[in-house]
Image (spheres, grey):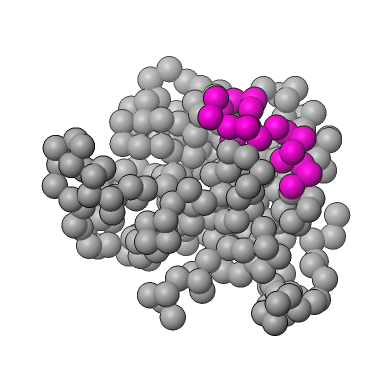
């Protein structure tokens, strides 16, 4: 499948292909945080709907990240064949310091609700850990008052020292379920940490699929049940050869950082 988008103007705004030269065209555009009815009780998104929406907007890869469970080999292979997408088997793990997206761990392992144990399990398989929506609700004073805590008032530099960021490899800086302020703060923290940041929709329905994505420099081979494509993705993650993107769902893909006011 060619990943080059047509060179057209939309609404008077430059599309992705007009903004970047061919040498910087994306290899694979992946929604790194997706929930379906196969593994998330709070999702209404069927695999068939995900395929249809991905084709409509030009999304070329997905990281399936159900809550505390991973799709089995048969489900992954069936979906890969039906969709023609790059398909990564991930998982969103609920831990004692928040939700963590993992890539490379193919099954739930007892004890990984403790992030230190999750880190060990992921290291054993050469995987990658991403803090999901790390600052969701942090700027809502009611959220902290409900737990008897004072409002969040850390600077990005102070927030970067939180324990979770010492144990993960990356953090979501663009999450479809977060407010612009939450995402912008996450991006500032990523800059302090020297991380590039991950883009992901966190979709639970067709609405929002691909609103935020991660753009990889190379075209990823769909791994199916084999290791090659997954290892390729992990290698690019470790090497920092990707960036968070925004606007694919409205056909105006651009680097997420360019949409954040404090960086302009």
Q: Residue 50, can we see it?
A: yes
Whether residue 222 appears in magenta in the rendering, the answer is: no
Is 257 situated above or below 202? below
Q: Residue at x 58, y 63 (%)?
A: 246
Is 96 situated above or below 8? above
Q: Residue at x 79, y 61 (%)?
A: 3
From the viewer's perspective, is 107 left or right of 60? left
Q: Residue at x 53, y 55 (%)?
A: 199
From the viewer's perspective, is 123 left or right of 147? right
Is 166 situated above or below 117? below
Q: Quadrant of residue 239?
A: bottom right
Whether residue 49 appears in magenta in the rendering, the answer is: yes
Is 5 situated above or below 169? below
Q: Which quadrant of the rendered structure holds the N terminus? A: bottom right
Task: Give the percent coordinates (x, y) of residue 137.
Answer: 33, 47
- Tell me the chief SS of the magenta region: loop
Q: Quadrant of residue 218?
A: bottom right
Q: Quadrant of residue 78?
A: top right
Magenta residues? Answer: 34-53
Q: Residue 190, can we see it?
A: no
Task: Give the percent coordinates (x, y) of residue 186.
Answer: 38, 58
The image shows a total of numbered marks equal to 0
Q: Nearer the viewer, residue 173 or 77?
A: 173
**Residue projecting furthest to the top:** 110
Q: Nearer the viewer, residue 10 or 152?
A: 10
């Amino acid at each position: 499948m060619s990943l080059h988008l047509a060179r057209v103007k939309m609404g008077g705004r430059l599309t992705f292909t007009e903004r970047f030269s061919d040498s910087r065209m994306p290899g694979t555009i992946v929604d790194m945080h997706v929930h379906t009815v196969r593994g998330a009780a709070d999702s209404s998104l069927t695999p068939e709907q995900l395929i249809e929406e991905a084709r409509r907007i030009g999304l070329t890869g997905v990281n399936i990240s159900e809550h505390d469970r991973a799709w089995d080999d048969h489900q992954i292979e069936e979906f890969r064949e039906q969709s023609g997408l790059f398909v990564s088997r991930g998982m969103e793990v609920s831990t004692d310091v928040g939700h963590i997206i993992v890539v490379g761990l193919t099954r739930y392992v007892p004890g990984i609700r403790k992030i230190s144990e999750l880190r060990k399990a992921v290291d054993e398989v050469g995987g990658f850990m991403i803090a999901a929506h790390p600052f969701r609700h942090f700027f809502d004073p009611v959220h902290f008052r409900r737990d008897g805590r004072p409002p969040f008032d850390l600077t990005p530099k102070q927030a970067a020292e939180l324990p979770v960021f010492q144990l993960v490899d990356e953090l979501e800086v663009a999450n479809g379920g977060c407010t612009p302020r939450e995402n912008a703060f996450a991006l500032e923290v990523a800059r302090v940490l020297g991380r590039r940041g991950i883009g992901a929709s966190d979709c639970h329905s067709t609405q929002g699929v691909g609103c935020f994505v991660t753009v990889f420099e190379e075209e990823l081979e769909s791994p199916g049940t084999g290791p090659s494509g997954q290892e390729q993705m992990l290698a690019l993650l470790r090497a920092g050869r990707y960036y968070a993107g925004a606007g694919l769902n409205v056909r105006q893909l651009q680097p997420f950082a360019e949409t954040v006011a404090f960086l302009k």
